[in-house]
Image (cartoon, coloured by chain):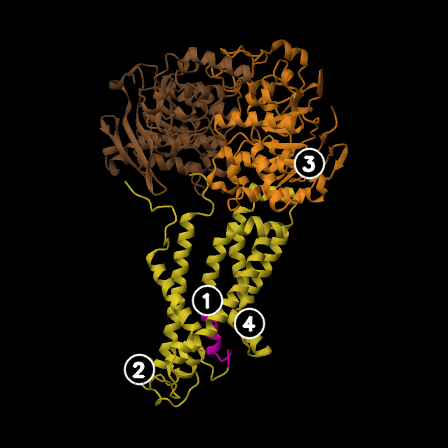
Amino acid sequence: MRGLTVVYRGRTLWPWKTIGRLTAVRDLSFSIGRGETFALVGESGSGKSTVARAVQGLVRARAGRIVFAGRDVPSPIARRDAAAKRRMQIVFQNPDASLNPKHAVATILGRPLAVFHDLSGAARKRRAGELLADVQLEASYLTRMPSQLSGGERQRVALARALAAEPDLLLCDEILSALDVSMQARTIDLLRKLQVEHGLAYLFISHDLAVVRWLADRVGVLFAGVLCETGPAERVFVPPYHPYTESLLLAAPRIAGRLARRGPSAEPPASGSGTSGCPYAPRCARRIAPTCDVAFPPLQEIGGGHAIRCHVPAAELARTQQDLAAAAVVAAPAPAASGAEA
Amino acid sequence: MSGLAQALIAVNGLTVEYWSGGRWLEAVSEVSLAVAPGEILGLAGESGCGKSTVAYSLLAERRPGSRIVLGSVFFEGHDLLQLSEAALCGVRGARIGFVPQNPAASLTPSMTCGQQVREVLDCHGGSRRGRAAIHELMALVGLPDPATTERKYPHQLSGGQQQRVVIAMALACRPALLVLDEPTTGLDVTTQWRILSLLGDVRDRFGTAMLYVSHDLGALAQICDRIAVMYAGRIVESAPAAALFAEPRHPYSRGLLASVPRIDLPPELGGCLRGMLRRDELPDGCRFAPRCDFAEPSCWTTAQRLEPPDATHAAACQRQRALPLLAGKHARRSRHFG
Amino acid sequence: MNVAKSRSVRALPLPPVAAVAAVVLIGIVVVSLTGPLWAPYGPAALGDGDPFEAPSFAHLFGTDNLGRDVFSRVVYGSRPVLVMATASTGLAVIIGAAIGLLLAYWRGWADELGMRALDIVMSIPPLILALLIISALGNSGVLVVLTVAFLFAPRVARVVRAATLAIVTEDYVTAAIARGETALGIAARELLPNVAGTVFVEFSIRTGYAIVFIGALSFLGFGAPPPAPEWGLMINEGYSNINASFWPVMAPAATMAALVIAVNLFTEGLARMIGQRGVSGLRE
């Protein structure tokens, strides 16, 4: 179903006075279908938050288009019309900072209701109560202040606030990172339930692959502002992987295994360090010098909507990579062919 | 607790209260644990369970608004809780290192990293001082190019590098014990992997014992030898890491494990912990009873102790033996409705 | 084994010194509002006593050079001071807070421009500017209030801007921006409640300064003309004859000092109370 698409393609420049202009995200394109969950995975500094904010219009894009429900949407939020603003909502990472500490929950939920739906008085209060019920909080929470809520509860109020606008697309910027494990599990369940009930599409930003695997329909892996790999979840987690995806899977904590022997080696470079080649080349175990350092890798389509941006042919990757997301007993994995150990 | 006699640090019956809302509340109740030399003990639990309080008690740190009511912390022949501040200064930093949670907040923003490491060395270092020692420490924790890094200010480093500087400071005097409070929270997966590898290396090279406090079971799984699970101020299960993950005996540990997202298995329905820890509604008996799927009436009134006492794998649940059977029935039931 | 001070709100969260100061303040305000009840004589009543009498039961603070009762004049003089000081401070705080909030919200070049404009106004010696304005436009209470407000607003704006900068990047403000709220709406609804403590403290501090400033203006003759019982004017009238009796100078000066000290101590207690409770203490 392609009723709703978001296509973002472009450069985002993040002016940084001491270092000069820094390209946070480069030539990024992806689309999200109606009711679909698209997960964007990457480490800190990869630019994933920038993408969420750019889509929401909080950060100015240097180039590129955002197409929402068939219509082009201007980049800065101030220039968007009310409908565009309403149908796309963002939920932030830090529950402590996303709610105004001086506003009661009723006020927090009331603002979007007033702004987007022109509700007031009893109707507004009733709707706020319904929203709370949707996120599994009791109506008595309406009179509480954020300081009286736990982190998980605050995050749910933030979700309710986003839902108040009745959006079509929800941008979730690492919303689980600040939560406890049990709270995370319940929030994930809640997200699934809401998606089914309201037909929501999610742009789910996370660095946790385990969550993403089972929540997302499609996944994009971001490194230093470049999308290395995109595809349906069930295909991305199975070889062939982009070498960066491979290292993420190696580093992902496993309950039943000890620390994997081979993991990411060098420190990540500052994004946009100006290399024209593949941004992952300095850390890549499969680097082909000098191709990878000089030429920007091409996008290889592997079929079924799965694409990898790498110089190494997909067939070779498929041949030499283990299935790292399978049953968790991972002994020291066999080193890959080129073995550029750190 | 095994091997109390040979433990490097032994906590006995620790009870800590804090002042809240006009009265004293128990944050930690009768916690006993021991870390053997060279062992990495993990302390797991959700926020609010008291694990950070236990960690700070190992340093005998008296925080405003809290008081240590009972208990002892034996380390190298002394009860740290009875020592004077002056004597404690000799222990902290020198014999027990501390790595706090937020590296950006624990480094002084106005001093360069080199100066901060030097500060620790000057305070306790004795013969090992000077540039060479600082560079050696930085290389030890894997910071690239010590000569340049030592001149940088904390805000110029990434989160992972900041945490390495903090670890370098904690290791400066080759302490016997390292206490880490959520050291990798807020760092992403790849940085976390590197820090954990570093800690493993440190333990292998120097035999440093560690107490690793975290709510992230994934991180604990990768590095800990033993894990103690805390709930509402009490230890509810204590076991070798592999045993805990293979066979959790306490319903809370089960629930916690079930909530952790696994990359290899889809999440099970109905395995999550329900409800919330409410400090004002704790029953006299087992504190987990209100949220427990397997609780029977006597659980509310009977205080639970770790059973079997002094075994390597113990859980504070009177129904632990019946649990596997009950859990099977429960899972079948919830799949029915799920 | 420390017991931290209780964080819950009790009946009197103020430290004792501030509480005493508050009582003194309230006393002065009450006396000024109900002046005639306290003052045995009218403000300009002449000839009730000999000039430069020492304090006695009839004249609590003695009499001045024209034989007027000093105590009564002090009481009557308290009203214009308090009214003008609070009015001008109130106006300064309203304008200054609005400017500070908006500058912090906009940041960027608008903020730079605004700050430079404020700097320019603040760099002019306040007293000189006030004298210029008043001598050009005449002595009137309203003018004094407006001038003082104009002079104090930039200082308030600076403080409020600093406090707002600390919170303006928080996600809840971003969420409001994403909703498409107007700048004024965000300033009023999201930002102001979180800096209200700072604003209130600023109000208290500026009131103290305003009292002294207005006193200085009337001392220099730029306040109300004689025979108004303004404190500054009384000091002016009395200081040349200070050898004969110091009471006509001491009484208004001491009262002014007491008032300003009380305001400052009260403000300090208030600030400490707000600091203790924290601006947004979220996680327990």
Question: Mark 3 falls on what kind of element?
Answer: helix
Q: Can residue A108 be seen in this view?
A: yes
Question: Same chain for marks 4 and 2?
Answer: yes
Q: Residue at x 58, y 74 (%)?
A: C133
Label 2: chain? C
Q: How far apart are marks 1 and 4 (CA)?
A: 16 Å
Residue A215 is drawn in which quadrant? Answer: top right
Q: Position of residue A327 (x, y in %)?
A: 53, 11
Q: Are marks 3 and 4 in contact (CB under 8 Å)?
A: no
Label 3: chain? A
The residue to which callout 1 is attached is C209
Chain identifier matching the orange colour in the rendered picture: A
Q: What residue type is labelled 2?
A: Pro
Give the side of residue B338 with respect to residue B20, left or right. right
Q: Which residue is drawn at 64% across and 27% down?
A: A197
The residue to which callout 4 is attached is C129
First in residue order: circle 1 vs circle 2? 2
Q: Do the residues labelled 1 and 2 touch (CB within 8 Å)?
A: no
Q: Residue at x 54, y 29 (%)?
A: A176
Q: Position of residue C20 (x, y in %)?
A: 34, 62
The residue to which callout 2 is attached is C55
Q: How far apart are marks 4 and 2 (CA)?
A: 39 Å
Magenta segment boundaries in residue numbering: C207-224
Q: Residue C136 carries which label?
A: none
Q: How far apart are marks 1 and 2 (CA)?
A: 30 Å
Colour of chain C in the image = yellow
Give the side of residue B191 with respect to residue B133, left or right. right
